[in-house]
Amino acid sequence: MAWNEPENNGGDKDPWGGGGRRGGGDQGPPDIDKVIKNLSKKFNSLFGGSGGGSSSGRSVPGGGGLSGGLIAAVAVVVAVIWGFMGFYIVDAAERGVVLRFGKVLDSIVQPGLHWNPPIIDDVTLVNILALNTQTYVARSMLTTDENIIDISVTVQFRVDDPVNYVIAVASPLGSLDNAAESAVRHVIGGNSMDQILTTGRDRVAADVQERLQGYMDVYNTGIVISQVNVIDAQPPDAVRAAFDDVIRAREDEERVQNEALQYSNRIIPEARGEAQQQMEQANAYKEESIARAIGDASRFEQLLVEYELAPEVTRQRLYIDSLEDVMTSSSKILIDVEGGNNMLYLPLDQMIQRGGSTASGTAQELRDLANRIAPYLSAPSGTNAVDRSRLTTSGRGAR
């Protein structure tokens, strides 16, 4: 007998877990409501619900089967969305800090694609390579000489420890602002206004950076101060004109000092060079004098030997050499008279010395004198002697 054929008692083997046949022995379609009810029971059992139904086994119209399936579908969708929300990407310049129920995990999230359960884990991404800048403009502060100055500074920093940056303080940037103002006030209070406005800016910036880094280390913020710059430092408006005059006067003083230093750097090497040159010349003159003296002594010794061999000849030779030296070094003019054997000698060197004239004046006098005596030199030899009274000249050097 087939499983779905009716038995003797008129029942049937319904594959849907049958109750009695509907309408007598007619074979009908499966009960859809009962199938939905069974499925809803299974889902309710999964989510902690009761799978009760009517005692007669028949489905109750409008029951909880349809609502249970909808809840299951919604739960699956929510689970999928929750899973996708856990994916995140960490850039190359970033590091991630994970808080699980408020507790920091030991490992720092490195760059790449990661997943953490949403709601359970709280991930904070921190850029550790970016150079951040905080600017503090026109802060009025008191100097050590009890003057008020308006100063503006910039602080450049980066994050070195992302864990401390996230959990050590509630507001890292707020702590940085407060610490920066405190450090600037401390350093400004230890310097005079004149130093801050003129030559002490670099030292002020270095002191502020050192003190601010100390504050950040004490607070354990994970921040490293890269650089502090003093971008502006001005006195109050009421006294700014007077300070400008002082600064200009100081600049003039520095300019004069620089010019004097430049002149000193130029003239000192020249003086040293001239001194060295004179020393070299003195040494050369010394060597020359010594060599000349040695040569003269050697020549005298040689002449002494010759003089001992031939005294008269050597004496005449020495006389002629001495006369040649004297005549060579003296100024003279020898005039040959035409047709005669006499030569007229003019002691022009003595005339020049007595007149004290310059070189140009001496040359002119020589030309004038030559023109005046030229007619007498061309006279015939048979005539009377030259009238010496006519040779008397006027002016300097005449005799």
Image: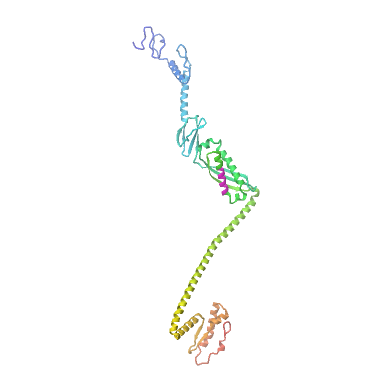
Along the viewing direction, whichever of 350 and 378 lies nearer the viewer: 350
Q: Is residue 167 above or below residue 359?
A: above
User: Which residue is outermost to the top?
Assistant: 9
Question: In the image, residue 170 lies at what x, y percent?
Answer: 56, 35
Q: Is residue 134 visible?
A: no
Magenta residues span 202-212
User: In the rendered image, which quarter contains the N terminus?
Assistant: top left
Q: Is residue 12 above or below residue 337?
A: above
Along the viewing direction, whichever of 338 and 290 lies nearer the viewer: 290
**Residue, x 50% and y 80% (percent of image)?**
329
Q: Is residue 392 above or below residue 265?
A: below
Question: In the image, residue 104 lies at what x, y percent?
Answer: 50, 33
User: Which residue is outermost to the left?
Assistant: 1
Q: Tell me, what colour scheme is on the image? A: rainbow
Q: Is residue 329 visible?
A: yes
Along the viewing direction, whichever of 172 and 151 lies nearer the viewer: 172
Q: Is residue 103 above or below residue 271?
A: above
Question: In the image, residue 62 lies at what x, y percent?
Answer: 48, 16
User: In the rendered image, which quarter contains the C terminus?
Assistant: bottom right
Q: Main secondary structure of the magenta part?
A: helix
**Residue, x 48% and y 22% (percent of image)?**
71
